[in-house]
Amino acid sequence: MPLHVPPAPAPALRSVLTALGSPTAVREARTPSLRAAQGPTTPELPLPVYVLDEITAAGASATRLAGWRFLIRSGDHAVAAAETRLTPDGWAFSHFFEGPYITSTERALRQAETMKQPYQPRLLSVPGLYMLTLWLHGDCTADGASGHPAATDLLVPLAPAPPGIAAHRPHRVAELLPVLTHRVSPGPLLGQLA
């Protein structure tokens, strides 16, 4: 089933396009692959980036929208990503970056495309574990800029994943959040997903 990528706010996309068109912004990007890209670069696959601020013992979560991430494509693959953030004046370009999460995100999205159920892709960051997941939201008509993980949504940890949590293995939110609860809270580790 195809993924239903939510539309990014128009100002977020414009800010990325402006940054890509600025030789100064690209030169100062500290992303060698973006500076070395041959031919045009285009922002694709806008994904809302949520941060998991709190996991309760009951498995409920408190998330907040932190920005929108665009994969920057050059040729047949993504060479970098651009992140935007919400400011008092609206959506603004934040920074370009590269690293293992770029290829891991592409791989997880390709994997999600083969699933039978349609999903709306999002990213969910778990700062306490230095972990990023592809969040596959079951409500494809939902506003990408709001919502919380439902128990039946899927989370796909991206590589590199924390020790004991297998990258690229989909988990239901109801299955993974209790493990994360134990991982981010002090005390002994009470379960791992490998």
Image (cartoon, rainbow, N blue to C red):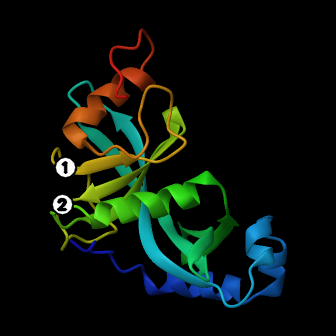
Which mark is on residue 138? 2
First of labels 1, 2 by sequence position: 2
Q: Secondary structure at mark 1?
A: loop
Q: Secondary structure at mark 2?
A: loop
Residue 89 position, x and y percent, is: 56, 77
Spatial CA span between label 1 and label 2: 8 Å
Residue 98 position, x and y percent, is: 67, 61
Q: Is residue 59 left or right of residue 111?
A: left
> Where the C terminus falls, by quadrant?
top left
In this figure, what is the number of numbered marks? 2
> Where the N terminus falls, by quadrant?
bottom left
Residue nearest the observer in this picture, 154 or 19? 154
Residue 58 position, x and y percent, is: 20, 27
Q: Which residue position is annotated with label 1?
A: 150
Up the image or down, 102 lies above or below 144; here it is: above
Look at the numbered discs 1 and 2 and tell me whether their residues touch, using CB distance below 8 Å. Answer: yes
Residue nearest the observer in this picture, 130 or 38? 38
Q: Is residue 66 visible?
A: no
Residue at the (24%, 42%) spot, across then down: 173
Check disc 2 and give the amino acid type.
Answer: Gly
Residue at the (52%, 73%) spot, across then down: 70
Q: Is residue 157 left or right of residue 33?
A: left
